[in-house]
Amino acid sequence: MKDNSRRGFMGKAFGAVAGVGAIASLFAMKKTWDPLPSVKAAGFTTLDMSAYKENELVVEKWRGKPIFVLKQSKEMLDTEDKNMSQLTGKTTEAMDKKRLIRIGDAEYMVTIGLCTHLGCIPGYNQDKKSFLCACHGGMYDDTGMVTKSPPPRGLDIPPFKIKGNILVLGEEGPEYKKMKETGITL
Ligand code: FES
């Protein structure tokens, strides 16, 4: 009898703890399922571009994929100019700056944050201003262009449309269509 009542008590206590645990995990699950504030219905993500800081990589999300947003500083743009003219004899304007998205007075790198080799997520080094993919050592510059193989191409640019200060991911605006036509992205 005594044993039974203890068992009964233990059972209730366990049930109560399990109940709290279940509610807590339901909350945790709901939190995981809830879209980020920036994510809208129908596969669109809207980004307020005035919120980003120069040379600070922010990882957003679009259709379950990481999206790298990197606002360029003047120093970054100058370095890109120099590197590119050393490499090709042409100015960056003619080459990798085409990978950047101009909004207002600022230029942004906005790419899918998955290595174009086998899909790992590259890490950004703020001092070196470059991306390293730890899986096989591939590297990209701060515009998402490959600087060291094996990645076969630069980081892909997601479909986007510019609406004032807002960038809508998931819609194909004229700037994106031009990038696709000129082979800058897939
Ligand atoms: S997956 Fe990035 S270098 Fe291989």
Image (cartoon, grey):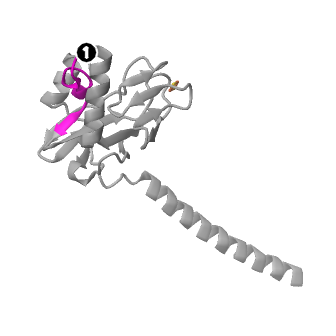
Disc 1 element:
loop
Residue marked by disc 1: 89
User: At which x and y percent is residue 30?
Assistant: 45, 57
Is 46 placed left or right of 20 in the picture? left
User: At which x and y percent is residue 18?
Assistant: 65, 67
* Residue at image point 48% right, 28% down: 119
* Residue at image point 21% right, 23% down: 179
Residue 106 position by quadrant: top left
The image quadrant where one finds the N terminus is bottom right
Magenta-drawn stretch contains 12: no
* Residue at image point 21% right, 41% down: 168
* Residue at image point 30% right, 49% down: 39
Is 4 placed left or right of 93 in the picture? right
Magenta-drawn stretch contains 100: yes
Indicate the amino acid at tag 1.
Gly
Is 1 placed left or right of 23 in the picture? right
Query: In front: 16, or 52?
Result: 52
User: At which x and y percent is residue 165?
Assistant: 15, 48
Residue 186 seen in the figure: no
Disc 1 packing (10 Å; few <14; some 14–19; many ≥20)? few
User: At which x and y percent is residue 136?
Assistant: 56, 25
Is 81 placed left or right of 163 in the picture? right
Query: In front: 11, or 130?
Result: 130
Image height check: is 91 above or below 26?
above
Image height check: is 160 above or below 54?
above
Query: In front: 154, or 91?
Result: 91
Image height check: is 11 above or below 58?
below
Q: What stretch is highlighted in magenta?
A: 90-102
Residue 140 seen in the figure: yes
The image quadrant where one finds the C terminus is top left
